[in-house]
Image (cartoon, rainbow, N blue to C red):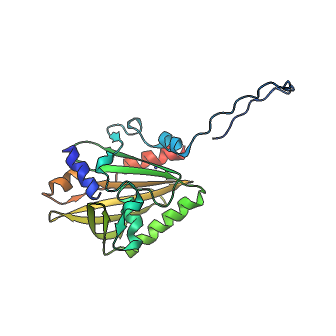
Amino acid sequence: MKRAALAVVSVLALTSALTACSGGEDTPTGSPSAPKARQITPAQRLAKVIVTKDDLPGHNVSAPEAEYAFAKSPDEVTVDRPGCAPLAHAMNQLPLGEPQADITRSAGTGFGKASTYITLAVYEPAAEAESVLAGLAKAVPGCGDGFTAKAGENTTAYDSVTAEKGTAPGAVAFRSTMTFRGVTHTLHTEAVRDGDVLAVYFSVNGFAVADSRRPSDAKMSATVVRAQNSKLAR
């Protein structure tokens, strides 16, 4: 069933250098200088700040399986309404804009329950993260009547998009609906900026969508959002 749920998601388918001091003494000519600490890369930085199971007791936290991804990169995605592209990317764990690095994890509390996908992306300069978030906010009202996203053989039609209040201050949040096998499912997305890092959260009950015997409404997990935002703020 896990594979089925993940398949549905595909249908919907984130230092300083240190130098030694000599204590006031002159360094002898020809002696090697103290080595500098290795500078952390953007990807390594995100790997350190993404939530883990230790940050979310009672949750399973893992990297999504690549074979079930809606698309491997934003470049593979086309939408029938170009202004809605940021929404398609946000709902399919794809980075917004052109970040230096990004990373994604999924967090859930068990079989049959909703999962929250967390995508972190780091930008240079930091103002780019703010610009990307503003672009996402602008896209929401313009895509209220829905849109269709395609990537290779994957196609997802979103019936509606509606702005809503996020679980965190300053968040850009919206809910969207999609119909699968005649059953309507509600998805929730939220994006929050912390300096040069943008965190995008996407909540879906993949099990309910795969089963499609009843409608589902995957409420955003305030616990997951709070844990990740707190870790970013440290």
Q: Is residue 216 left or right of residue 134?
A: left
* Residue 211 screen position, x and y as percent: 15, 53
Residue 160 visible in the current orientation: yes
> Vertically, is 139 above or below 196?
below
Q: Number of numbered discs present?
A: 0
> Vertically, is 62 above or below 151?
above
Residue occupying the point 44% across, 58% down: 191
* Residue 23 screen position, x and y as percent: 82, 26
* Residue 175 screen position, x and y as percent: 33, 64
**Quadrant housing residue 201:** bottom left
> Vertically, is 79 above or below 100?
below
Residue 166 visible in the current orientation: no
Q: Quadrant of the N terminus?
A: top left
Front residue of this view, candidates 72 and 51: 72
Residue occupying the point 40% across, 35% down: 54
Q: Quadrant of the C terminus?
A: top right
Q: Is residue 143 left or right of residue 98?
A: left
Q: Is residue 27 left or right of residue 162?
A: right
